[in-house]
Amino acid sequence: MDYLMFCDHCGMPKPIGEYIMREYFWIASHVYCNNCNKPNKIPEHLQQLSLQMRKGCKGTNE
């Protein structure tokens, strides 16, 4: 499942693929907007979701 974040500065939507969410959101603090190139803080609840996704994938060959 893909996720959608909206830029805090310009409002442009940014699709976040499941792989990116699972592999990077738990360690990243910001995502840059493709439109205005400004950083957007990754909310703590999305970082927690990313950790849960990683735990759920342990032992799989992805």
Image (spheres, rainbow, N blue to C red):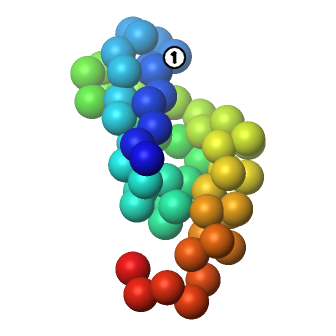
Place of residue 60 in the rendered image (x, y in percent of width and height, measured from the top left): 49, 85
Q: Residue at (37%, 49%) from the top-left corner?
A: 17
Place of residue 32 in the rendered image (x, y in percent of width and height, measured from the top left): 39, 36
Q: Residue furthest left?
A: 35
User: Which element carries disc 1, helix, strand or loop?
Assistant: loop
Q: Quadrant of residue 16?
A: top left
Give the residue at mark 1. 8
Is 56 above or below relative to 7? below
Is 12 above or below relative to 17? above
Is 15 above or below relative to 25? above
Instruction: Name the side, left or right, on which 40 lies relative to 29.
Output: left
Place of residue 13 in the rendered image (x, y in percent of width and height, measured from the top left): 36, 21
Place of residue 14 in the rendered image (x, y in percent of width and height, measured from the top left): 35, 29
Q: Residue at (41%, 11%) from the top-left corner?
A: 11
Number of numbered tags placed on the structure image: 1
Q: Which quarter of the figure is the C terminus placed in?
A: bottom left
Q: Residue at (73%, 42%) from the top-left corner?
A: 44
Q: Residue at (65%, 43%) from the top-left corner?
A: 46
Say which of 15 and 28 sits in front.
Answer: 15
Say which of 39 and 5 sits in front.
Answer: 5
Pointer 1: residues within 10 angstroms few (<14), some, or many (20+)? few
Going by the numbered disc 1, the residue's amino acid type is: Asp
